[in-house]
Amino acid sequence: MNVTKTEAKCSQLPTDESLKEGSPQKNSAEHEGYAGVHSSVRITENNITGAVQSKERLLEGVIDKDNMNNAFKRVKSNKGAHGVDGMVVDELLHYLKENGSQLRQSILDGKYRPNPVRRVEIPKEDGKKRNLGIPTVVDRVVQQAIAQQFTPIFEKQFSDNSYGFRPGRSAHDAIRKCQTNIDEGYKYVVDMDLEKYFDTVNQSKLVEVLSRTIKDGRVISLVHKYLRAGVVVRKRFEETEVGVPQGGLC
């Protein structure tokens, strides 16, 4: 008998109130760093991704003004907590008006360096804690801009029975699919979960898989920078050689 597994998951960034943590002191020099000159902690990019201009020109689509504007609107509507620089979502519009052109150019030139994410712990129902990595609000805009370009490309590769994090699909759609399966005579449900999946993702393998579809090496390089941007835990920087942070899009 065939078994159909239907996924239905939701994700939302925590708010400052829910995290109940103090906001770090903002630093204007750090904000200027979004144009490509970051303060304190930096990660040197590994150039194995071959970040050269491609005929695909996907990076131009990422930094397109309309794409970036839609990314900003999405980040603003999702709200969420601040990152390591302390900038909150309400400050984002003013910052992008002042620095948007520089931000886009630094990405195009390959000079943009993402900030490390801010580590927070969220209690789980079983008493354990889930580690989240909160990117800066500017990094969330860039990540969203990348995701908006990736989505129509990778949507074609997903199973029709996949509902998790899919545009135009919801948990209610997944439930309706389950009901249809029951009506068709299916009797078994298989529930599987990979323990600590996000914490154990092989970054090299992830970049390899992305590269099979995404042929613009500059975009792959940008994603790689996010993977290696590191994390700040209790004001201490830690490198991220494995895993991907829960709380962002990259």
Image: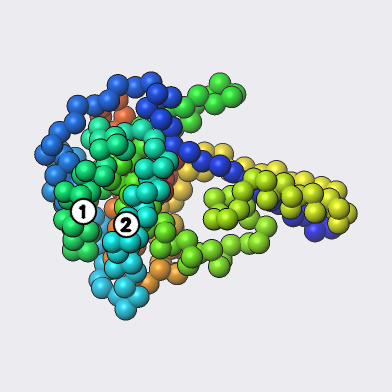
Q: Residue at x 31, y 73 (%)?
A: 57
Residue 25: image location, x then y, percent: 19, 27
125 on left or right of 141: right
Question: What residue did someone put label 2 on?
Answer: 68
Residue at disc 2, secondary structure: helix
Figure quadrant of residue 239: top left
Residue 39: image location, x then y, percent: 14, 41
Precedes in sequence: disc 1 or disc 2: 2
Q: Residue at x 41, y 56 (%)?
A: 147
**Mark drawn on residue 246:** none
Asked whether residue 221 is in view, the answer is no
Residue 8: image location, x then y, percent: 63, 46
Q: Amino acid at mark 1?
A: Gly
Q: Pointer 1 and pointer 2: residues touching (CB < 8 Å)? A: yes
Residue 185: image location, x then y, percent: 88, 54
Q: Residue at x 41, y 42 (%)?
A: 77
Asked whether residue 53 is in view, the answer is yes
Figure quadrant of residue 31: top left
Q: Amino acid at mark 2?
A: Met
Question: What residue did someone put label 1 on?
Answer: 100
Mark 1: give few (<14), some (14-19) or many (20+) Cα within 10 Å: many
Q: Quadrant of the N terminus?
A: bottom right
Figure quadrant of residue 40: top left
Q: Nearer the viewer, residue 109 or 193?
A: 109
Q: Is residue 54 above or below residue 20?
A: below
Q: Residue at x 40, y 63 (%)?
A: 149
Residue at disc 1, secondary structure: helix
